[in-house]
């Protein structure tokens, strides 16, 4: 176990009778003797080791050593001290598997991974690798922290704010003048014309006649 664990995603090897092999009711993957080992809950429902481990990993940290609810009947099952690999294995399911898969491999939990040690090959002198599969929930990437802003940047932002405020104040003054000017004209002159036109003075009618009469003589 000294070597670094290698993350491995389980895939079924093609076999002739793979369609006839029993499969997990959650992931619909055929059982094997490693990560897909059939585990029996206290309600007699059977699921693969990986799916049960994922159900436990989805629980709050304080409840991952307590009980797990069956996804079918919701009956609780006590989680063993050694974790999900310590649950009872369905010997009946294992007996249906091909002969080379009827021997259950030793699987343990290491952090958020299910791991087991591969058997060393006869023609290899290398140490047997530790194969793992991730069962923990993927965490959302946290947004990067905003970079600290310099004093010059803050001064520029303050200047821009003052410019905006000055522009808004100017627009308000212009709008107010446009609205106030017609009102002032109506109050002053009685119409929208702010300047009163001078009316021509009319001479008396009698003086006009006298002037015309003197011109005749």
Image (cartoon, helix red, strand yellow):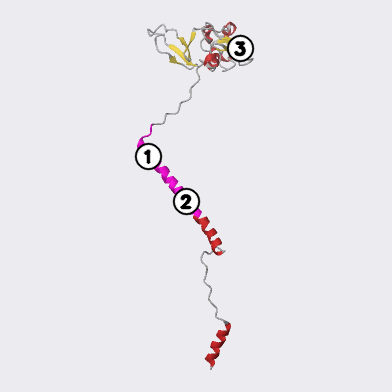
Task: Please state the horizontal and vertical placement of residue 185, each as a whole percent of the image.
Answer: 53, 61
| Residue 22 in view | no
- Residue drawn at the location 49% of the way across and 9% of the way down: 107
| Residue 184 in view | yes
Task: Please state the horizontal and vertical placement of residue 22, each as a whole percent of the image.
Answer: 59, 12
Task: Please state the horizontal and vertical placement of residue 140, each as a whole percent of the image.
Answer: 48, 25
Q: Which numbered marker is on residue 76?
A: 3
Judge whether residue 153 is colored magenta.
yes
Q: Earlier in the sequence, mark 3 or mark 1?
A: 3
**Badge 1 density bin: few <14, some 14–19, many ≥20, Cα 10 Å:** few
Residue wearing tag 1: 155
Residue wearing tag 2: 171
For the magenta stretch, what is the residue range? Answer: 148-176
- Residue drawn at the location 54% of the way across and 58% of the way down: 183
Q: Earlier in the sequence, mark 2 or mark 3?
A: 3
For the residues labelled 1 and 2, the Cα–Cα distance comes to 24 Å
* Disc 3 element: strand
Determine contact: label 3, label 1, CB under 8 Å: no
**Badge 3 density bin: few <14, some 14–19, many ≥20, Cα 10 Å:** some
Residue 211 vs residue 160, the one in the foreground: 211
* Disc 2 element: helix
**Badge 2 density bin: few <14, some 14–19, many ≥20, Cα 10 Å:** few
Relative placement, left or right, of 120 versus 47 is: left
């Amino acid at each position: 176990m000294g070597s670094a664990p290698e993350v491995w995603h389980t895939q079924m090897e093609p076999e002739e009778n793979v369609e006839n092999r029993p499969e997990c009711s959650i992931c619909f993957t055929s059982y094997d003797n490693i990560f897909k080992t059939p585990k029996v809950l206290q309600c007699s429902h059977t699921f693969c080791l990986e799916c049960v481990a994922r159900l436990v990993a989805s629980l709050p940290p304080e409840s991952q050593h307590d009980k797990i609810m069956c996804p079918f009947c919701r009956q609780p099952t006590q989680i063993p001290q050694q974790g999900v690999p310590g649950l009872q294995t369905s010997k009946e399911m294992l007996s249906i598997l091909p002969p080379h898969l009827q021997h259950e491999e030793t699987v343990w939990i290491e952090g958020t991974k299910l791991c087991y040690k591969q058997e060393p090959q006869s023609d290899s002198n290398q140490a047997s690798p530790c194969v793992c599969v991730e069962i923990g929930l993927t965490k959302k990437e946290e947004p990067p922290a905003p970079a600290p802003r310099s004093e010059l940047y803050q001064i520029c932002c303050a200047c821009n704010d003052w410019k905006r405020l000055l522009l808004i104040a100017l627009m308000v003054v212009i709008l107010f003048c446009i609205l106030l000017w017609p009102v002032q004209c109506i109050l002053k002159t009685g119409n929208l014309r702010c300047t009163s036109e001078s009316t021509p003075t009319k001479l008396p009618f009698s003086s006009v006649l006298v002037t015309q009469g003197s011109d005749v003589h």
